[in-house]
Amino acid sequence: MIFFWTIFFFFLAAPARRAILSNLRVVLPGSNSLVNLGRAWLTLYNFAWTISDAADHKLAKTEFAFVTEGAEFLDQLATAAGAILLTAHMGNYDLGAAVFAERFQRKIRMVRAPEADAETAQHLNDSLERAGAGAVKVAYNTSSMALPLEMLNCIRQGEIVSIQGDRAVAHVSQRAARLFGEDVMLPDGPFMLAFVAQAPIFPVFIVRTSFHRYKIIARTPIHCRRDERSRESVIEEAMRDWCRILENVIAANWSEWFSLVPIFPER
Amino acid sequence: MKENGHELGYAFALPRLIAWLAGRRARRAEFSRWEAYGLGILVFGISCVFAARTILPVVRPGLLRGLSLLLLPFAIWIAYLLLYFFNAQIVFLLRRLRLYSAPTNNPFQHIVIMSVTTLLAILLLQDECAWLKSLGVFWLALLALNLLSIFILKLLHEA
């Protein structure tokens, strides 16, 4: 079923297909355009599976097998008194947050880009909160000043705030960064939050490896410590570290990067 | 964080019994891609083969036959979507009558799909073509072995 649905959406969801293709051209420089069409199909196929798996987990409580890379960092995150979980539009981040919250009995505040459709937003909220047995709360990233203060409060109360840091949406704080040798705009909110709260940032990704199998990738935490340097330079250095991690993880898992809008400047 | 990525898990009793006979521990979980994709391809394949066998004798020109074969998998996909939708309506009705209480429609859908495939396999058994007959036999043998495995595993569990 998923195989055929992917074919269907591959032809019908042209903007998403074009976005994947434009991202692939940068992530895999020199790659063949024809082969990239196949890669775009595979990316959509994986995307379909992650949606199906998340629904399976939510409705039927289906069990998934997973391996971890950087388990020591996950353990640190689980015991951290307030932290930022920085991830990307990659693999099954919804399922990952729900499983993490459930296994470690930790509350997660998930910051997401606002949904264009109110009903979709409501459905997503309900799904995530149900999948995480109430431990996952969704907050939408808007231009409002209330959200950063709310998140700061959550971190200070020892909660984990999960943010996707691979794409900046309009009207949210962002700054220029270098990703795969290209100038891109990335959200700087997570880094400012880490600086103000003096909380560590844990880069975590969950990628699908096979049928009902996932790999959780956790990388060395990024710190935005106050020191003799200016706030700006601390944040910029942290963003550079984040970009190197992103490049590394995306290059190895390009078929799981579900950035369905173009990230890189048009050539 | 405790991993479970190296565990063996199968939804069906037959692979669990085979794993047990091979001295490996396997539990009831949907972890196997071979089982999931293999069964999916087999169910879809039997439906496609049956439909092709029914349609091809009435389609004469070679070009039209080729086109039919090309479109057949998509037609079967749409037919399955309709079947799933129809089943969902039945489950909806059963739920309203308080005759179905499972949290998802999966058990009902599973029984219907397995029954339809078994029916098609029985029809393939009556075909003159040897390989079509063997496809039917293969499905029925798998079904019988799986039912037998359920029984054996139950006995082993009690022992």
Image (cartoon, rainbow, N blue to C red):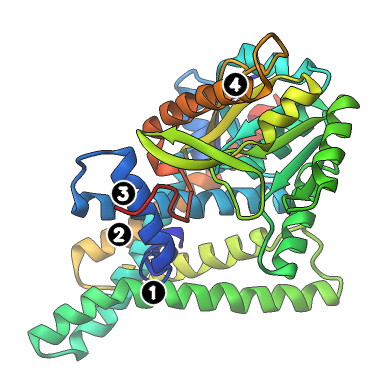
Q: Secondary structure at mark 1?
A: helix
Residue B39: tell me if it is visible: no
Name the front one of labels 1 and 4.
4
State the SS at label 3.
helix
Q: Is residue A68 above or below residue A228?
A: below
Instruction: Place residue B129 in its image quadrant.
Output: bottom left
Q: Earlier in the sequence, mark 1 or mark 2?
A: 1
Q: Nearer the viewer, residue B58 or B144?
A: B58
Task: Looking at the picture, tell me which residue is in the foreground, B53 or A254.
Answer: A254
Q: How far apart are labels 2 and 4 at the CA level?
A: 68 Å
Q: For residue B135, which numbered disc appears in the image?
A: 2
Query: What residue does disc 1 label?
Result: B76
Residue at 63% over, 49% down: A54
Q: Are marks 1 and 4 on the same chain?
A: no
Q: CA distance from mark 2 to mark 3?
A: 34 Å
Q: Which residue is mark 3?
A: A39
Q: Which residue is mark 4?
A: A233
Amino acid type indicated by mark 4: Ser
Q: Earlier in the sequence, mark 4 or mark 3?
A: 3
Disc 4 packing (10 Å; few <14; some 14–19; many ≥20): few
